[in-house]
Amino acid sequence: MSTYLTDHFNHSKPSLEGALEASSPCEQTASLQQSGQLSVGERLQMALQRFTSGFSTPVVNPLVTAYGDAYRLVVEADALVCLAAGEAVLQQQLADDSPQLHSGQVAIEKYRQAIALRPDFLEAYHALGRYLQRQGNTLAAIEVYEQSLEQNQFQADIHGALGKCYSENGYLQRAIRHFKRAIKLNASLLDAHFGLALVYELDEQPEQAIKSYEALLQQDANYLPAINNLGSTHLRLANYHQAEALFRQLIEQSPKFARGYLGLALTLDKSGRGKEALPYYLEALQLKPKARNSSYIHQRIVEINEGLGRSRKTTTQQTLVLVKG
């Protein structure tokens, strides 16, 4: 089963707090900042005003105008998410009995407050869902994404995110439905094509998986995980000619990718061309000597060499040299 999952849902906005505090506003504003009376959202607005102060026509952040306090809550939550990432690293360095840091939980509460204040503010759902997803809480993320779709059904990226969350929780048919919807709304979403193909593999629909991988590669011929998985799927179906061509393409495009050599070795081996497979097994071992399937590779190298009339001792020495070299 293919294991390449791309994680293109990960997204967080950089905190502007440090940059805002490093600026030089008027004395009154500086006093407010030092006393902590300004929220992150207010400081963002002030930074925007300073940046545009030289323009003849004042520029106002349209999101502030449209969503007001809900927007400010999301900005503050985004800043807390950035802070939480740093806290996670710090927490690992602290003793087990040290006080727990909770910026992430506060961020979640602020996102939820923004949603309650303005249920039509889609970015609040997106930001909360992404954060929950990154934390591994995909069931909670599903709930948030579904609420977002209640506001607007035509969000391709949200359908794609739901497809990934549902697939990770074993709801394959729901995942297929949302990935298909994402592709219908935006056919250029490569992640949705890839996710759909993976779910088809999990659902034992290899022919459908092949169609999805091919649709993806028509848009990006250099999408290496799709080339690898498409080759693996053809190999499962004993389509050796197609599999060989794909794995050779993969090796050509990525000469240090061990799975390309292993895929080609397995394809040649299973099609009765063990002697041709041997150097690719050896190359796969040399590139990744501690791979999960290294025992099988060692076994096949020994068996192929014995079939060619070579001694087990010679075969073992040859393998060790290549792996250590």
Image (tube, rainbow, N blue to C red):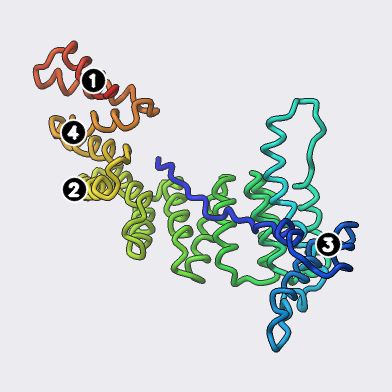
Foreground mark, 4 or 1, reads 1
Foreground mark, 2 or 3, reads 3
In the displayed structure, 259 sits above or below 117; it is: above
Callout 3 amino acid: Ser
Distance in Å between CA atoms under marks 3 and 1: 63 Å
Q: In which quarter of the image is the C terminus?
A: top left
Distance in Å between CA atoms under marks 2 and 4: 14 Å
Crowding near pointer 4: few (<14 within 10 Å), some, many (20+)? many
Identity of the residue furthest to the top in this view = 313
Pinpoint residue 252: horizontal percent, then vertical percent: 23, 48
Foreground mark, 3 or 4, reads 3
Distance in Å between CA atoms under marks 4 and 1: 18 Å
Distance in Å between CA atoms under marks 1 and 2: 32 Å
Foreground mark, 1 or 2, reads 1
Callout 2 amino acid: His
Q: Is residue 158 visible?
A: yes
Distance in Å between CA atoms under marks 3 and 4: 64 Å
In the displayed structure, 201 sits above or below 54; it is: above
Pinpoint residue 134: horizontal percent, then vertical percent: 63, 48
In the displayed structure, 201 sits above or below 270; it is: below
Seen from the viewer's position, the closer of residues 293 and 51 is 51
Q: In this view, does 300 lie to the left or right of 19?
A: left
Q: In this view, does 319 lie to the left or right of 310?
A: right
Label located before the other in sequence (3 or 1) = 3
User: Residue 277 shows which numbered tag?
Assistant: 4
User: Residue 321 shows which numbered tag?
Assistant: 1
Query: Which residue has dot 2 on it?
Result: 241
The residue positioned 80% from the left and 35% from the top of the image is: 100
User: Residue 39 shows which numbered tag?
Assistant: 3
Q: What element carries label 3?
A: loop
Label located before the other in sequence (1 or 2) = 2
